Image: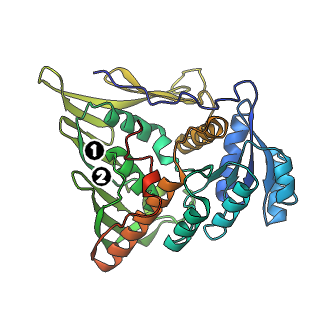
Amino acid sequence: MTTPVTPADGLWAGSEHEPAGFAIIGTGYRTEYFLQIAAALPDRLRVTALLGRNTGRAAELGDRYHVPVADDFEALVRSRPAFVLVCVAWGPTPDFIRQAVAAGLPVLSETPPAPDLDGLRQLWSDLGPEAPVQVAEQYQFQPMHAARIALTRSGLLGSPQAAHSWHCHGYHGVSLLRILLGATGIDAKVQGFTSSEKVLSRPGRGDESTPLAEADANRTFARFDFGDRYGIFEFDGTQYWSPIRSRGIAVRGTRGELVTNDVRWFADDGSPRTATLVRQDGGLDGDMTAHALWRITCAGETVYANPVAPARLHDDEIAGAETLGRMVTFANTGKPFYPLADGCQDHYLSMLMDEVSATGQVVKAEPQTWADSLLVGTDPS
């Protein structure tokens, strides 16, 4: 078996000799997530300015992470960032994107880039395909997902026929399905339903000291028919925090299949083969190297190498770090990794999924104004 290592080449391109500077607009949970990543990678990233409407919260984060706090947008621009990370609530996100683009700054937008279809269409109408905007869709860069995507793209499984995601919500799940299947979703037919279930859980991000209680788990199911291939979405919110609700990914191709971490395929000589995705982490069971993920292998071959090892980051933080690194490359070279068009398409299909899961109807996606600018599912040549 010969499979490619997931491509991480070009990260931080153009800033190899000094940390790349970026500014952040927003002071919420996701802002702190990115501040933690930057703090863990001081040789690669630095925050030039933090701007937030909640000045008290901005000052608190500035003190905690030792980053400058901007009094206004003009001060943020004067900090000369390579790009701006817009990390605010859905409603004000489009206006901040427009403001940064108007100031000549590349933008990395948290998901989604606008709250509804009208907002997505208006943002696209205002900015268009040439706007220097990328979307922080990080799930494709989570190490296990990145390894699964690399295996799928290697041809080991043959032509992908179907994918099933029960790993993450909404537009994130839609994104993974489109990437694994190589589908734009422009003409997708969408059908679905919702199932109300009960499950023991702890509220929100409660730790193990929080009492267990029976909660409603409204599970969404959807089928995306992409013509010659299809994707199945399944998720409920308790899966992010529950140790008794699993998460997973499955891909079936003409030559084999991948189910979460197990891979089965026909070798070139026609013999059936099996293998497992295996994490290689340092710092475990007496190992004295850094407590970090180093690589993921399959049948003894590396299919993923952690681009930020030995930084002590969990999987989603690794994904966030790769998103920032790719944004640095985009700001310096123009090489896209998840354009505004794809962020709009994921959210559009996710909204269709919410519609059909509530009504039980079947709807067909309509080509949107950003259809010709999609990166996922198109021939990169």
- At a point 66% along the width and 42% down the height, the residue shown is 37
Q: Secondary structure at mark 2?
A: strand
Residue 112: mark in rendering = none
Classed neighbour count for the residue bearing mark 2: other residues with Cα under 10 Å, few (<14), some (14–19), many (≥20) = many
> Residue extending furthest left?
270
Q: Mark 2 belongs to which amino acid?
A: His
Please say if 184 is above or below 355: above
- The outermost residue toward the bottom is 359
Up the image or down, 39 lies above or below 112; here it is: above
| Viewer can see residue 352 | yes
Relative to 301, is 325 on the left or the right?
right
* Residue bearing mark 1: 251
Instruction: Find the distance from the CA under tag 1 to the CA under tag 2.
Output: 7 Å
Residue 362: name its quadrant: bottom left
Given the image, on which type of amino acid does mark 1 rest?
Val
Q: Position of residue 245 (x, y in %)?
A: 38, 56
Residue 368 horizontal/vertical position (percent): 43, 64
Q: Residue at x 61, y 64 (%)?
A: 126
The quarter in which the C terminus is drawn is top left
Secondary structure under the numbered disc 1 in the rendered image: strand
User: Can residue 243 be seen by looking at this rendering?
Assistant: no
Find residue 164 and name its label. Answer: 2
201 or 169, nearer to the observer: 169
How many neighbours does mark 1 have within 10 angstroms: few (below 14), some (14-19), or many (20 or more)? many
Q: Position of residue 372 (x, y in %)?
A: 43, 53
**Sooner in the amino-acid sequence: mark 1 or mark 2:** 2
**What x and y, as percent, mark residue 138?**
52, 47
Q: Residue at x 35, y 32 (%)?
A: 277
Is residue 129 depicted above or below 354 in this figure? above
> Would you say the residues marked 1 and 2 are in contact, meaning their CB atoms lie under 8 Å apart?
yes
Q: State the image quarter where residue 210 is shown.
A: bottom right
> Which coloring applies here?
rainbow
